Image (cartoon, rainbow, N blue to C red):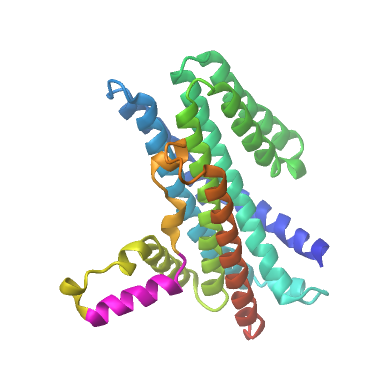
Amino acid sequence: MLARVLVVTLNTYREAVRARVLHGLFGLALGTGAYALVVGQFALRDTLRVVSDLGAASISLYAIIVAIVLGATSLYRELELKTVFPILARPIRRSEYLVGKYLGTLLTLTVFVAANAGALLLALAALSGASLALALGWGLGGAAIAGVVAYKRPRLGTYAPIVWAAAMLVGGWFLSSGALDDRRVILGSAALTVCEVAIVAAIANVFASFSSPFLTAVFTFGVFIVGRSADTLARLPHRVFGKAIQTAGELTSRVVPNLMLYVPPRTLLTGEASSVPLGEYLSLAALSSLAWAAGLLAFASLVFRRRDFL
């Protein structure tokens, strides 16, 4: 079973990495990070804070977009090209196939977040006093090596971004030691973003198991908006909205995943909120994400198993 799921996972990852829309969104994310650097230069004393806050927000935004796009199109592309039929004709269950597609999407998202976070950490390193040449050399040199590997060994080329993203993240972490608080913000936000997109991708899988890409994207984005508003829905004032709407808001906040859990205040990420240790918070957030993803995938597998392709 694990071998079959792994094959589908890696194949999904290879297809996603080759998608032009992913390259475009990655370029936009890097461009937004560069914009954060420009804006940070106008701050007199809080340059690092502006860069880390804007950069972390941009990583979260673009990761959500990528999760929705990949979740809405990955399964449909297989159905449209009819490549799913020879796959399911082999000894593989539909649930295993769906889980493999989800894990491949999640692997792509993790690489996307890690690469962007690594680039942002290298920028912080240069701003906090580290060698600019070393920071640029680490990032651009790693990209050049990955490009050479992709050109010389096309079969290994699609896996080069995994190693490059990991190298960017590790190198950025070491070089940005002069900005400890901002480094914690970026790394903590990146980890929480991966947890959040794991839920969003699972939601997209549920809708993709029975709907078209456009409707899947719309429904997933709608659930995402409601999830980001869960805290507000749970505390609607009775005097303004009335009892019925207040009750509906409370029920909705309990049904959808509370995605505000994955965008905590800066004080928690920097450790200033001593009442809630960051490690404990990240662990609880990861467990919540895992529980939601498992439940949503189980429901998506049930729906997909009953789907008639004819």
Residue farthest along the left direction in this orientation: 240
- Magenta segment, prevailing SS (helix, strand or loop): helix
The answer to which of 244 and 211 lies nearer the viewer is 244
Left or right side of 243 for 130: right
Left or right side of 107 for 56: left
Q: Position of residue 37 (x, y in %)?
A: 38, 27
Residue farthest along the front direction in this orientation: 275
Q: Is residue 41 magenta?
A: no
Q: Is residue 231 visible?
A: yes
- Give me the residue at 35% from left, 25% from top: 47
- Give me the residue at 53% from left, 24% from top: 176
- Give me the residue at 55% from left, 79% from top: 210
Up the image or down, 65 lies above or below 38; here it is below
Magenta stretch in the rendered image: 243-257
Q: Position of residue 204 (x, y in %)?
A: 52, 67
Left or right side of 135 for 61: left
Indicate the quadrant containing the C terminus: top left, top right, bottom left or bottom right: bottom right
Up the image or down, 268 lies above or below 134; here it is below
Q: Position of residue 169 (x, y in %)?
A: 60, 33
The answer to which of 36 and 255 lies nearer the viewer is 255
Q: Is residue 18 visible?
A: no
Indicate the quadrant containing the N terminus: top left, top right, bottom left or bottom right: bottom right
The answer to which of 229 and 90 lies nearer the viewer is 229
- Give me the residue at 56% from left, 58% from top: 198
Q: Position of residue 282 (x, y in %)?
A: 55, 49
The answer to which of 179 and 59 lies nearer the viewer is 179
Up the image or down, 277 lies above or below 38; here it is below
Left or right side of 221 for 308: right
